[in-house]
Amino acid sequence: MVNDAGTMKIRDAVLVVPGIMGSELIDDESGAMLWGLRDPRWYVSTWTTGRGLRRLALTDDELSGRTGRVRPGKLLSAPAYAPVLRGAEPYTALVRKLQAACVHPCAVAEFPYDWRLPVRHTAQLLADAAERHLRSWRKFGEGHSDAKLIIVAHSMGGLLARHFVEDLGGAAEVRKLTTFGTPYFGAVKAAVILNLGRGAPVPLPRKHLRTLAATLPGVYDLLPRYRCVDEDGGPRLFTEADTVAIGGNADLAALSLGHRWSDTPPPQLRTVVGLNQPTAQSMTIEAGKVNPKNFLRKADGGCEDHSGDGTVFRLSATGFADRPGYLSQQHAALAKAPESLDLAHAILTEQALGPALGAQGIGVDAPDLVAVGQSFTVRVVGSGDAAGLGCRILSAESHEQVARPVFRRQGAEITARALISTPGVYRIDVKQTGASPVSCLLMAAPGDELSLWEE
């Protein structure tokens, strides 16, 4: 359908599926919010003390399938921080952009879910929600009886959606499936999280992340499923035994690692892939310690850096799909960057997308945790000139600028020094002329609350 302004509007139903940590979680009995609070001080307190995380850990009952103690609320409307993963950005702008592409805002529905639980369990809930939304939309007004479903998913949400399409009969009703930064073949970072603190001291927030993550089937569903473990005989698959060796749970690994995606993706699939960010792609495992590498070993023994979005490396996110779209962006920001929103709109309305985006973009390497009052370094890769770069550090809550570091070239590197004076969650935006900023979250906490922990 084309409206009076000449803009394409679609009549299909649209479902937005967020990534891991992208949904609010609520204690069903008390109504207390367990995840997704807007106050950044909650994240500082929670990750430094660990107290707010205890109710998020899966209980034995939940691991046995008796769920319901925790229920999803809404999609995030404010940033949520986690160490290493950095957390999740709000989905508000994405939902609004998709609503603008539809004949009515009610065509767009959201699917919040308990991201702690196994992907295949939640995929069945997605199938039920998709059927309800499509049925409701077909009854909404006139001219929608032949509508189909369009799914737009970020990160882990793409795994749910693809299970729905490939394994649960969703293909018949899904016209398009678009995923942003989905780790179809897993992410080395998931193994890093399960291994935090083994063999080397780490700050307390990372210890608390490992303690929580070790109980969550959703994290095990993100473990790498490709030849990423470097050994003398060449790269090999990551195994259940590796999971145990690095500190993970054997039963949860066994439930997750057996699944492999088809190398013939569903024809509905379009993938959007983050590019140019320093990203772990392989690893060595030595005495139970994971050593991530920002390259992938080739069959001839050489190395190749495929880059990625800082969490998911490029080849994992393509999922064997044809014509992926590329954006020079970090993982969480793929759900809100202006180019991502434009690309999602274009895919929905079948407008021309133009060339792949982000091929000449920059990458940002910045810490996920910093001590208040102590300077730290932000590094840019992929740019030959510091003069065309700008950097701002903003409060993730108020969007107020708190620092404006200046990039300088020192030898082969382009870096900037920065300092944050108040505890909280912040966003680093690094902008190159002609593109929107590459964005990532970090947390600043008092130095004594980031004291090192060693197993």
Image (spheres, helix red, strand yellow):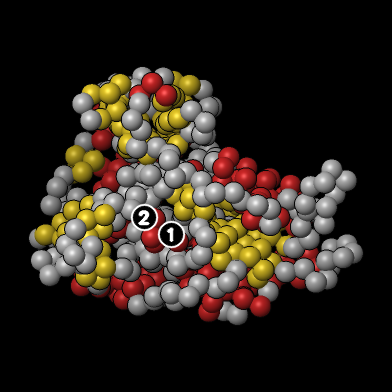
Asked if 404 appears above or below 315 in the picture, the reply is above
Image-based side of 136 in relation to 80, left or right: right
Q: Which mark is residue 313?
A: 2
Label 2, secondary structure: give it.
loop
Residue at the spot 66% in from the left edge and 63% down from the top edge:
150
Viewer can see residue 177: yes
Residue 177 pos. (x, y %): 59, 64
Q: CA distance from mark 1 to mark 2?
A: 7 Å
Label 1, secondary structure: give it.
helix
Give the residue at mark 1. 317
* Residue 362 vs residue 332, the one in the foreground: 362
Residue 11 pos. (x, y %): 78, 60
Residue at the spot 10% in from the left edge and 60% down from the top edge:
287
Image-based side of 117 in relation to 300, left or right: right
Residue 145 pos. (x, y %): 83, 71
Residues packed near mark 1 inside 10 Å, few (<14), some (14 to 19) or many (20 plus): many
Residue at the spot 61% in from the left edge and 45% down from the top edge:
341
* Residue 30 vs residue 57, the one in the foreground: 57
Three-letter code, disc 1: Ala
Residue 16 pos. (x, y %): 62, 57
Residue at the spot 31% in from the left edge and 76% down from the top edge:
254
Viewer can see residue 34: no
Image-based side of 389 in relation to 409, left or right: right
Asked if 446 appears above or below 99 in the picture, the reply is above
Three-letter code, disc 2: Phe
Cβ–Cβ under 8 Å for marks 1 and 2: yes
